[in-house]
Image (cartoon, rainbow, N blue to C red):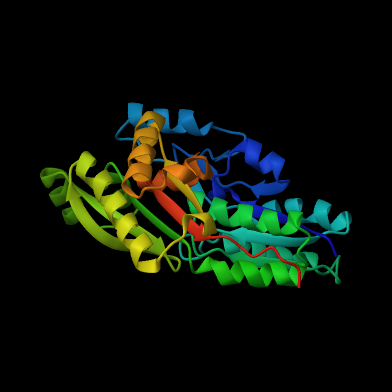
């Protein structure tokens, strides 16, 4: 049976990539007043979303998960076409998106008892989830059978890593992710956290003083990981993810390529904007690196 790829909006793939690879995205919702929630995909554009955060530093937006109905609306047309579905969701430790997709799957099996729907907890998010989704789309494009494709995605999932920093801890503190005292201390000392995401959870990878040093430290952490794991750049999908400031991200990417001696792979290391769903929690200035091993596309 042929299959298609669906992801929630946390994948942060640009519209052109979604269209090119025939990926269906089920968006999250965001709000600046806690009452009116807009579909992230067709509501506020991401750039405008960040610009509003920058212009209103005391304004803290919120997000809402796709509902089971949102997933039903995405699943039904695909199943009506006779397609199986691989649906990839943000780590369930951050969101109930995975649960919404599972509920929709259970509901829809009454109408399509023979349907094949695989809901995958990506254990990651944002641009790294996007790279994972692109690997799924590649398997589909190469006609790797459904069950083989699911197995290969699960095989590479644990190789995913994000190393990043943020401009301020205010948004994490507002969302209850860190204590108020820790936030005040970090503000006074200009401390910036260095964060690693893997296995579905956020891990503190260190701290740095000031923005410039925190970005250099992200590159240092990435270099150490690449060396320890003996990462072959040709065997990995890699992206730089950023929030509001693309110019800063381009400079960061150039420094990353130089430090890791990856200039030969420069065209393959993508530059993606982190979407509003994650920006709600990081603020407008997240910046970092995501990498995940490529899938084997050979058909057995």
Q: Please tell me which residue lies in front, 212 or 181.
A: 212
On the image, the x and y values in percent for residue 294 come to: 57, 60
Vertical side of 209 occupied by 300: above or below? below
On the image, the x and y values in percent for residue 107 come to: 76, 66
Q: Please tell me which residue lies in front, 89 or 18.
A: 18
Q: Residue at x 56, y 40 (%)?
A: 40
Horizontal side of 12 relative to 166 (left or right) equals right
Give the total of numbered labels: 0
Q: Residue at x 58, y 39 (%)?
A: 14
Horizontal side of 80 relative to 69 (left or right) equals right
On the image, the x and y values in percent for residue 49 come to: 46, 32
Q: Is residue 230 visible?
A: yes
Q: Please tell me which residue lies in front, 69 or 281.
A: 281
Q: Residue at x 54, y 66 (%)?
A: 157
Q: Is residue 68 visible?
A: no
On the image, the x and y values in percent for residue 58 come to: 29, 35
Horizontal side of 240 relative to 2 (left or right) equals left
Q: Residue at x 32, y 46 (%)?
A: 171
């Amino acid at each position: 049976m042929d299959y298609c790829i669906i992801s929630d909006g946390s994948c942060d793939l640009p519209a052109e990539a979604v269209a090119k690879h025939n990926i269906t995205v089920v968006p999250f919702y965001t709000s600046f007043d806690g009452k009116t929630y807009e579909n992230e995909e067709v509501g506020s554009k991401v750039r405008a979303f960040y610009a509003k955060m920058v212009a209103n530093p005391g304004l803290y937006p919120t997000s809402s998960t796709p509902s089971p109905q949102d997933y039903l609306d995405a699943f039904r047309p695909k199943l009506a076409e006779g397609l199986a579905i691989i649906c990839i969701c943000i780590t369930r430790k951050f969101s109930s998106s995975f649960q919404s997709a599972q509920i929709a799957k259970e509901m829809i099996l009454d109408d399509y008892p023979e349907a094949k729907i695989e809901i995958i907890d990506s254990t990651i998010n944002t641009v790294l989830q996007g790279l994972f989704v692109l690997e799924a789309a590649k398997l589909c494009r190469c006609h790797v059978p459904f069950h083989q494709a699911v197995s290969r995605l699960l095989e590479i999932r644990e190789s995913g890593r994000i190393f990043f920093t943020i401009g301020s801890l205010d948004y994490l503190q507002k969302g209850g992710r860190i204590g108020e005292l820790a936030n005040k201390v970090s503000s006074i000392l200009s401390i910036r956290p260095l964060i690693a995401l893997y296995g579905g959870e956020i891990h503190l990878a260190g701290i740095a003083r000031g923005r410039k040093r925190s970005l250099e430290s992200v590159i240092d952490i990435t270099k150490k990981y690449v060396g320890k794991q003996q990462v072959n750049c040709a065997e990995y999908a890699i992206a730089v993810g950023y929030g509001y400031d693309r110019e800063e991200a381009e400079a960061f990417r150039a420094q990353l390529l130089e430090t890791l001696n990856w200039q030969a792979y420069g065209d393959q290391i993508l530059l993606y904007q982190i979407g509003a769903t994650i920006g709600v929690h990081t603020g407008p200035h997240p910046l970092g690196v995501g990498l995940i091993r490529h899938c084997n596309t050979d058909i057995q």
